[in-house]
Image (tube, rainbow, N blue to C red):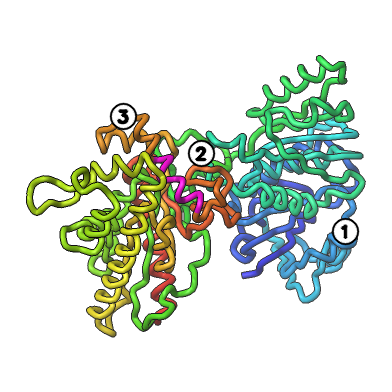
C-alpha cells in the first residue's frame, strides 16, 4: 500500500470514471489521495460548475473510497512550499499523457513525485453521459470576505465540501469559526470530540492541501455563541451554510441589520450522502440512530471499542514481567454500564480472562480483623459505623452517608482503603501469573473499578478502558439501582467526579467534559478504549467484541 497518491482524471469528467478510479485507488492508497480534474475545468473557470463538482466529487468519494482522505485540488495556484510538502508515492490516471504531457510531469507541478510509480488505468468506464455544469444559470460568484462555522470534529467529506466552496469563493479573506467546548455539552459522545486546537489544525491542513492560497488568508475564531464575528464585523460579505445551519445564518443577518450592516450572501450547500456503516471495520449503528447523512456524530460512534491511544509500556515495573497477565483497567462513573461490559468480556474471554471487581475486593478488606477494619474504627465513631450484631461488621451504607457529605472524611477513608485494595490486586495478579502454564496464551486480567484513576490503580494496568454514558443517564441509572433520589444520585456523581478532576482532569475535566480526545487532560483523554452503553444491548456487545478481538491481536502478536 502507498501512503499518499495523486489521482489525475485526464479526459472529460464523468461520475462513472471518477468512481471507478477512486475504487481502484482505495485498494492501493491507505491514507491521502489528491484528486485533479480534467485541465479545461481549471483553465475555463466557472464557479457554478466548480461548486457542483465539489459536491459530486466528495459524494462519489464517500461511496467509492470511504476510508481514504480525498483532497480535490481547487483551480488556484499553490505556493511553492505547499507543492514541496506533498509527497506523492503513486500517480493514478486514466491516460498515459494529459494534454500530451506525461502524467509524471503533470504530477511534478503539483507535488514531490520523485520516485513515484505511475499506474495508468485507461479502461475505466466513461458512462453514457458526461457531467456538465449548469452554466446557463450562473448563481455563484466570488466574494470578498467569506466566513463559515462549525464543530469540524472528525473532518469528513461533508466538511470538505463546505470548506472547499468557501475557499473557492473567497477572494480576500476567509474566516473559519470553530465551536468551543462550552457550546458542545449536548453533542452525542461529546467527550470524544477532538480538542479545539486539533480541530483547527486539521482544517488548516486541509485548506492548505486543496490550494487555498495566500490571496485569501485563513483565520480562525473560537465560537462561544451561535453567531461569532459576523455580527460584529461589517466587512464580511458571504457565509457558507448547510441546511442545518441555514436558520442560524438568517439570524446572523437579522443581528447585522440591527446594526445597519449589509446582509451576508448565504451560500447554501447540500450535505454529502454517506454509506451506511456495517462492514467488518464498522459498527452497525443503533436502531434508533437518526443520521442519514455523513456526520461527525456517526464517525464518533465508530470510535467506540476501538484503540484510541497506544498502550502504555508493560506495567510490570519492579516485577517479573515474564508471562505476567495483561492488565486492563475498566473505569467509569457509577451507572455507566461497567457491569454489563464485564459480562460481555466474560463471554468473549472465557477461561483466559479474570475479572477483579475492586468493590468486591473492598468487601473483604472491611471484614473484622483486617488492617483496614481497625484503622476505620480508629478514624470514625465505632458506635455509628459498626453493626451491633456479631461479628460487628462495618455498615458500609452508614459509612457512605458520613463520607459523601464530608470531603475530609472521604479522604480519610480512601487513605485507609485504597492502598489495601491495591495490594490485594497485585497479589491476585501474581497468583494468576503463577497458575498460568508457560504454554498457555497470555492471561488477561480486568480490574473493574469506578475509582481506577482516583486511587492510582491505573498504574497497575497496561491499558485503561472506560465506560461512558451522558450525565443524565448516569444519574437516572444510579438513582434506580440504589433506590435513592435523583438529587442524591447527582450529589454522589459530583463527589465521584471530583477525584477524577483532581487526578487526571487538571481540576476542571471530568467524565462528561467535551473535547477530551487528542488532549492529555481528562479520563477519556487518558483512556485507550471507550465504550458507551447508552443504546441497545447488541450494540454494546458489538463494541466489546471489537475491543476484545483487537486486544487479542495486539497481545498475541507481541507475546509470540
Q: Which secondary structure lies at badge 2? A: loop
Span highlighted in magenta in the image: 493-502
- Quarter occupied by the C terminus: bottom left
Horizontal side, residue 508 vs residue 370: left or right: right
Q: Could you tell me if the residues under marks 1 and 2 are in contact, i.e. CB atoms within 8 Å?
A: no
State the image coordinates of residue 375 (x, y, percent, origin top left): 27, 59
**Where does label 2 land, which residue?**
188
* Furthest residue toward left: 390
From the top left corner, tell me how far across and down residue 290 is, in percent: 48, 33
Residue at image location 22% in from the left, 59% down from the top: 374
- Asked if 470 appears above or below 544 in the picture, the reply is above
**SS at mark 3?**
loop
Residue picked out by circle 1:
99
Q: Is residue 249 above or below residue 536?
A: above
Nearer the camera: disc 1 or disc 2: 2
Q: Determine the CA span between mark 2 and mark 3.
A: 26 Å
Mark 1 or mark 3, which is nearer the start of the sequence? 1
Q: Residue at x 90, y 34 (%)?
A: 144
Residue 47, above or below 352: above
Amino acid at each position: 500500500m502507498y501512503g499518499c497518491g495523486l489521482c489525475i482524471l485526464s479526459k472529460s469528467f464523468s461520475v462513472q470514471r471518477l468512481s471507478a478510479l477512486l475504487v481502484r485507488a482505495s485498494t492501493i492508497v491507505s491514507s491521502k489521495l489528491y484528486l485533479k480534474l480534467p485541465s479545461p475545468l481549471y483553465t475555463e473557470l466557472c464557479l457554478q460548475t466548480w461548486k457542483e463538482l465539489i459536491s459530486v466529487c466528495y459524494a462519489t468519494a464517500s461511496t467509492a473510497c470511504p476510508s481514504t482522505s480525498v483532497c480535490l485540488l481547487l483551480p488556484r495556484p499553490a505556493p511553492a512550499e505547499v507543492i514541496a510538502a506533498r509527497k506523492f508515492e503513486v500517480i493514478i490516471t486514466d491516460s498515459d499523457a494529459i494534454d500530451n504531457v506525461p502524467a509524471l510531469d503533470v504530477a511534478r507541478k503539483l507535488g514531490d513525485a520523485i520516485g513515484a510509480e505511475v499506474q495508468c488505468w485507461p479502461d475505466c468506464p466513461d458512462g453514457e453521459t458526461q457531467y456538465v455544469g449548469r452554466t446557463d444559470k450562473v448563481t455563484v460568484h466570488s466574494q470578498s470576505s467569506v466566513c463559515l462555522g462549525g464543530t469540524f470534529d472528525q473532518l469528513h467529506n461533508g466538511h470538505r465540501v463546505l470548506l472547499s466552496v468557501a475557499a473557492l469563493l473567497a477572494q480576500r479573506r476567509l474566516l473559519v469559526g470553530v465551536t468551543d467546548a462550552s457550546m458542545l455539552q449536548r453533542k452525542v459522545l461529546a467527550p470524544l470530540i477532538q480538542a479545539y486546537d486539533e480541530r483547527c489544525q486539521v482544517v488548516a491542513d486541509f485548506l492548505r492541501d486543496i490550494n487555498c492560497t495566500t490571496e485569501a488568508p485563513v483565520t480562525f475564531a473560537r465560537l462561544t455563541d451561535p453567531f461569532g464575528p459576523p455580527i460584529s464585523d461589517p466587512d464580511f460579505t458571504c457565509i457558507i451554510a448547510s441546511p442545518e445551519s441555514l436558520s442560524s445564518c438568517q439570524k446572523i443577518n437579522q443581528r447585522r441589520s440591527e446594526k445597519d450592516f449589509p446582509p451576508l450572501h448565504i451560500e447554501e450547500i447540500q450535505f454529502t450522502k454517506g454509506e451506511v456503516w456495517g462492514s467488518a471495520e464498522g459498527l452497525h449503528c443503533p436502531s434508533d440512530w437518526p443520521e442519514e447523512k455523513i456526520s461527525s456524530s456517526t464517525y464518533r460512534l465508530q470510535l467506540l471499542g476501538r484503540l484510541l491511544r497506544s498502550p502504555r509500556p508493560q506495567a510490570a515495573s519492579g516485577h517479573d514481567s515474564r508471562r505476567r497477565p495483561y492488565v486492563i483497567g475498566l473505569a467509569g462513573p457509577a451507572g455507566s454500564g461497567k457491569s454489563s461490559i464485564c459480562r460481555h468480556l466474560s463471554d468473549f474471554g472465557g477461561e483466559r480472562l479474570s475479572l477483579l471487581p475492586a468493590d468486591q475486593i473492598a468487601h473483604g478488606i472491611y471484614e473484622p480483623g483486617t488492617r483496614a477494619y481497625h484503622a476505620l474504627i480508629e478514624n470514625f465513631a465505632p458506635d455509628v459505623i459498626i453493626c451491633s450484631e456479631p461479628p460487628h461488621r462495618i455498615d458500609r451504607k452508614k459509612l457512605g452517608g458520613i463520607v459523601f457529605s464530608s470531603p475530609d472524611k472521604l479522604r480519610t477513608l480512601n487513605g485507609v482503603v485504597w492502598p489495601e485494595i491495591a495490594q490485594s490486586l497485585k497479589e491476585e495478579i501474581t497468583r494468576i501469573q503463577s497458575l498460568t502454564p508457560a504454554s498457555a496464551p497470555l492471561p488477561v486480567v480486568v480490574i473493574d473499578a469506578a475509582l481506577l484513576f482516583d486511587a492510582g490503580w491505573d498504574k497497575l494496568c497496561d491499558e485503561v478502558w472506560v465506560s461512558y454514558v451522558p450525565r443524565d443517564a448516569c444519574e437516572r441509572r444510579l438513582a434506580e439501582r440504589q433506590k435513592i433520589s435523583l438529587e442524591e444520585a447527582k450529589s454522589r456523581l459530583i463527589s465521584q467526579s471530583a477525584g477524577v478532576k483532581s487526578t487526571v482532569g487538571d481540576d476542571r475535566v471530568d467524565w462528561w467534559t467535551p473535547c477530551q480526545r487528542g488532549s492529555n487532560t481528562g479520563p477519556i483523554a487518558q483512556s485507550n478504549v471507550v465504550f458507551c452503553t447508552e443504546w441497545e444491548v447488541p450494540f454494546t456487545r458489538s463494541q466489546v467484541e471489537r475491543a476484545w478481538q483487537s486486544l487479542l491481536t495486539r497481545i498475541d502478536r507481541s507475546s509470540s
